[in-house]
Amino acid sequence: MFMLVPVSFLAKSQEDTTYWRAGLSSTIAFSQLSLTNWASGGQNSIALNSGLTLFADYAKEKISWKNKIDLAYGFIQQKDDGYRKSDDRIIVITEFGYLISRKPNRMKWTTMIDFKTQFDKGYNYPNDSMKISDFMAPGYLTIVTGLEYSPKPHLTVLYSPVSGKFTFVNDQRLSNAGGFGVEGAVYDIDGILIQDGKNLNSEFGSYMRVQFEKEVMTNVTVFSKAEFFTDYLMDFGIIDVNWESKLDMKINNWLSANLILHLIYDRDIRFEVTDANGIITGTEDRIQFKEYLGVGFKYNVSNR
């Protein structure tokens, strides 16, 4: 059994109905599988994925201010494997813009604050004996200021030569191990802890965001956002990448399908390397990739 129930609501601000646009969008997806004497085999399972997006946007003359909160959590539970997290995110973005040019292309001065973390502990399944992440471990705070250029209504490019990226690791075991790029703990020759690892890694560098959103054909909308960052102080030229893409297909007024792809490369996120005998020989950075496909009901109410 599969159920996907998105609910969206848009409303103007009560204080100023001319310049504010605000609302929310929520999604719940549930699936359940039960097998009894099933000859081809399988496992009983339950899966739940949920999401909530809140936004409030202001625009008046040359001033714009966009605010967004994006929350998601999901899990899968199978008979033998137990509870396993499948999705987990907290994203808060606020973006202030001042228009400095309308022609030939729109250009504005933009300052953005972007915060990301997660709700719950994370594990490298099937090993669930030691967590590899948690709330604020890591937490990412990015602060940028620069120019946003719009050569087309559906395409924007934001570049900031002056940006800060701050990584928080508020789990002492993970910070002692030097997780997510923070400075690890110091030990003596006998392995006795001398100094705890740091809980913050600060980077100063260059940031660029390319964002595309367009209805490419009737009832088919493509959204893609790619973020790039390189640190001036350490390993300049090595670029962290965060690329999210979404294909939204409206089948009718009630039914829709979504395909979401997410790629991450961050040199500070390390993965264990093991030899043929399973012995850990070191760590390495890797490309991370996630794909999600959902089909279900959708309902929208809008003031625009």
Image (cartoon, helix red, strand yellow):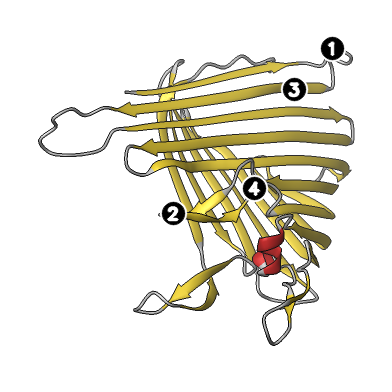
Q: Is residue 260 left or right of residue 145?
A: left
**Residue for badge 4:** 211
**Tag 3, which secondary structure?**
strand
The disc, 3 or 4, on the residue closer to the chain's N-terminal end is 3
* Badge 3: residue crowd in 10 Å (few <14, some 14–19, many ≥20): some
Q: Residue 125: which numbered mark, if any? A: 2
Circle 4 or circle 2, nearest the eye:
2
Residue at horizontal 66 percent and vertical 35 percent from the top: 70
What is the CA distance from the residue labelled 4 to the residue labelled 2? Answer: 33 Å
Return the residue found at the far left: 39
Label 4 amino acid?
Gln
Tell which tag, 3 or 2, sits nearer the viewer: 2
Residue nearest the viewer, comparing 50 with 253: 50
Tell me where residue 119 appears, x and y as whole percent. Answer: 64, 40
Residue count near mark 4 (Cα–Cα under 10 Å), binned few <14, some 14–19, many ≥20: some
- Picture coordinates of residue 150 (x, y %)? 72, 47
In the image shown, does 268 or 250 lie closer to the viewer?
268
Where does the C terminus fall, quadrant-wise? top right
Relative height, residue 80 to residue 215 (above, below): below
> Residue, x 89% and y 35% (percent of image)?
63
66 in relation to 132, above or below: above
The residue under label 2 is which amino acid type?
Answer: Tyr
* Front-lying residue, 169 or 213: 169
Three-letter code, disc 1: Gln
Front residue of 246 and 72: 72
Q: Foreground mark, 1 or 4? A: 1
Residue at the outermost top position: 14
User: Relative to 248, is 46 on the left or the right?
Assistant: left
Q: Which residue is mark 3?
A: 22
